[in-house]
Image: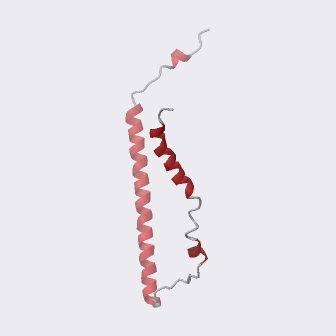
Amino acid sequence: MGGSGSIQPILDNNKNLLRKKSLFRDLKHEITGDYNTNLKFKEVDTEELEKIKESIRVKAKRDEKRTVLVSFLICVVSAAFLYLLLHDFSIDFKLFARRI
């Protein structure tokens, strides 16, 4: 039977792949472990919290304006591209008319 020498490494590799039946057996102790899930936040006074909120609002407004501007520019460039691509394209509809 020819070719058994070249097939053997493939079969060994397949056996190695089949041995790993569960990837989560090693992680089981981490899943069932007792962990502290309480979030701890830095204490901030109300004045500083308002400054943070205001800066987030300013950034959000700026990002929204930027998104609208980029979307508008993409639409204008797309429309200009389509116009330049199709402005010389004319169809003679007489070719499609029925002749009776």
Q: Which of 48 and 72 is in front in this view?
A: 48
Q: Where is residue 42 in the image (x, y as percent from the top left)?
A: 46, 87
Residue positioned most to the top? 100
Q: Position of residue 16 (x, y in %)?
A: 51, 54
At 48% from the left and 40% from the top, the residue drawn is: 7
Picture mark count: 0
Residue positioned most to the front? 1
- Up/down of 56 relative to 44, above or below: above
Q: Position of residue 13 (x, y in %)?
A: 49, 49
At 41% from the left and 77% from the top, the residue drawn is: 55
- Up/down of 8 relative to 18, above or below: above
Q: Position of residue 63 (x, y in %)?
A: 42, 65
At 40% from the left and 36% from the top, the residue drawn is: 83
**Left or right: where 98 falls relative to 78:** right
Q: Which of 75 and 44 is in front in this view?
A: 44
Specify the quadrant that holds the C terminus: top right
**Left or right: where 4 falls relative to 70:** right
**Left or right: where 89 falls relative to 96:** left
Q: Which of 99 and 59 is in front in this view?
A: 59
At 59% from the left and 61% from the top, the residue drawn is: 22
Identify the coloring: secondary structure
